[in-house]
Image (cartoon, helix red, strand yellow):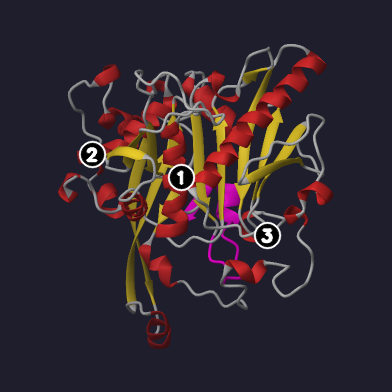
């Protein structure tokens, strides 16, 4: 795609917001990408000024009369907001340094503690329905629950980074199997109902992981997690009035409109794969029926730094898997991220009735964020995030989408990648 067709950074986007959000001719679905951008997001730029003494200016490489452009991007529908200022890259951290590499946090590295997850048959619990095992993963029951059904997917490999496509595919096979078994157990126990499945993946302590060994968690809850519920409600058009000028005009399909808004400014990539899978590890039989594409975008309002969103109408298909892996390698391989959070979930609950599966409830979303500098003693989550709902973002989404493009140059299992 020509570089001049889209903004190159958030400052350029915000300064010329009227151009990107201007009305266009009506497009597919009765509304356009520009309309989506205009209805979902707002942008503003503030000029912040201060005076630095000679010593301070020299210490941090700033002008003595400093003028900084602060960009604020807000999602009127979800309430998410992010602030960007490139000058903050020079902000000092004066805490004592922590580990700079992943293995610095490995308790087994110098012959210390054992790793429970390296010996899962003896040191992890089991669910009533047993375990699912593949060459790359094995399931377990989480010994310390935060949901009625709460499991683990343990990678065979001890190291928490450097995952292959095969490992990620097996993780989703295990998730698919575990949800099916958990739904069956819940159906027998309580009869027909609806539950919310979710896969969560925390890597290393800054991201909330309690074990160094690579693992994901599986949950099935009766109550909808609030962030998932918010997107689902917005998708049904039931939250009119919560935003100033945004929600009243939002299409019934909020997530697609969110995608279109990002596509308007060049932050979306469409992923199509030749590998057909039913999400449970078997090749799909509908080879003549094209699977819906998956979309990956760098968020304009990241909940944490470097947020990538994956969306697909068919979470069990190879397009979703390929897009998920592309997002993962964008962070870990292209951006050098060592600690991250990732989650995957359906936007609607899944029925406990016989025959229901993880992917039978419709569109699936995955979200990734990085969790800061491993060598820093400072948190990436402060008062503005906790109380104001504003993320002070470090990475420009246009930088992140360029990394996504690099990750897709030599994709595994992809036929085509389109902007």
Q: Residue at x 69, y 43 (%)?
A: 138
Say which of 212 and 62 sits in front.
212
Pointer 1 residue: 325
Place of residue 241 in the rendered image (x, y in percent of width and height, measured from the top left):
48, 23
Residue drawn at the location 47% of the way across and 57% of the way down:
332
Q: Tell me the distance, in whole angstroms, between the alpha carbons under discs 3 and 1.
A: 21 Å
Q: Could you say whether the residue bearing mark 3 is in a helix, strand or loop?
A: loop
Give the Cα separation between the discs numbered 2 and 3. 44 Å
Is the residue 359 above or below the residue 198 in the image?
A: above
Mark 2: give few (<14), some (14-19) or many (20+) Cα within 10 Å. Answer: many
Residue 252 in the magenta stretch? The answer is: no
The residue tagged 3 is 212
Percent of width and height locating residue 66:
34, 72
Mark 2 highlights which residue? 20
- Magenta residues span 372-392
Which of 66 and 331 lies nearest the eye of the viewer? 331
Q: Is residue 336 above or below residue 98?
A: above
Name the residue rendered at 63%, 36% in the picture: 174
Measuring from the top left, give residue 211's x and y in whole percent: 71, 57
Which of the two marks, 2 or 3, is nearer to us in this view? 3
Q: Is residue 399 above or below residue 268?
A: below
Q: Are marks 2 and 1 in contact (CB under 8 Å)?
A: no
Element assignment for label 1: helix
Q: Quadrant of the C terminus?
A: top left
Q: CA distance from mark 2 to mark 1?
A: 30 Å
Characterize the local packing of mark 1: few (<14), some (14-19) or many (20 or more) Cα atoms within 10 angstroms. Answer: many
Residue at the spot 32% in from the left edge and 75% down from the top edge: 65
């Amino acid at each position: 795609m020509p570089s001049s067709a889209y903004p190159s950074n958030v400052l350029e986007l915000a300064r010329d917001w009227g151009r990107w959000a201007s009305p266009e001719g009506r497009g597919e679905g009765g509304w356009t990408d520009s309309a989506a951008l205009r209805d979902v997001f707002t942008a503003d730029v503030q000029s912040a000024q201060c005076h630095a003494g000679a010593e301070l200016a020299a210490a941090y490489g700033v002008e003595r009369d400093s003028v900084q452009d602060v960009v604020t991007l807000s999602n009127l529908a979800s309430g998410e907001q992010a602030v960007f200022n490139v000058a903050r890259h020079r902000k000092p951290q004066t805490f004592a340094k922590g580990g700079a590499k992943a293995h610095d946090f490995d308790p087994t590295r110098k012959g210390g503690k054992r790793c429970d997850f390296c010996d899962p048959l003896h040191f992890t619990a089991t669910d009533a329905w047993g375990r699912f095992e593949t060459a790359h993963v094995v399931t377990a029951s989480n010994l310390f629950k935060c949901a009625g059904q709460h499991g683990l997917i343990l990678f065979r490999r001890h190291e928490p980074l450097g995952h292959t496509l095969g490992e990620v595919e097996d993780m989703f096979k295990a998730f698919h199997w575990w949800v099916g078994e958990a739904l069956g157990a819940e159906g027998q126990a309580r009869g027909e109902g609806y539950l919310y499945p979710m896969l969560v993946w925390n890597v290393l302590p800054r991201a909330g992981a309690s074990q160094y060994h690579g693992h994901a968690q599986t949950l099935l809850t009766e109550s909808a997690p609030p962030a998932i519920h918010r997107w689902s409600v917005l998708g049904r058009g039931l939250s009119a009035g919560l935003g100033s000028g945004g929600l009243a005009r939002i299409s019934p399909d909020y997530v697609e409109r969110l995608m279109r808004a990002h596509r308007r400014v060049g932050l979306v990539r469409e992923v199509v794969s030749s590998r057909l899978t039913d999400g449970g590890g078997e090749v799909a039989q509908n080879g003549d029926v094209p699977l819906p594409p998956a979309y990956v975008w760098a968020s304009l309002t990241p909940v944490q730094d470097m947020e990538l969103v994956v969306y697909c109408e068919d979470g069990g298909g190879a397009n979703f898997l390929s897009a998920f892996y592309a997002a993962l390698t964008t962070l870990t391989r292209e951006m050098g991220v060592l600690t991250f959070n990732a989650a995957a979930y359906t936007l609607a609950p899944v029925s406990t009735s016989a025959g229901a599966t993880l992917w039978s409830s419709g569109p699936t979303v995955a979200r990734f964020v990085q969790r800061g500098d491993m060598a820093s003693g400072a948190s990436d989550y402060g008062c503005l995030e906790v109380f104001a709902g504003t993320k002070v973002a470090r990475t420009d989404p246009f930088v992140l989408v360029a990394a996504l493009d690099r990750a897709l140059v030599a994709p595994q299992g992809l036929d085509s990648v389109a902007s």
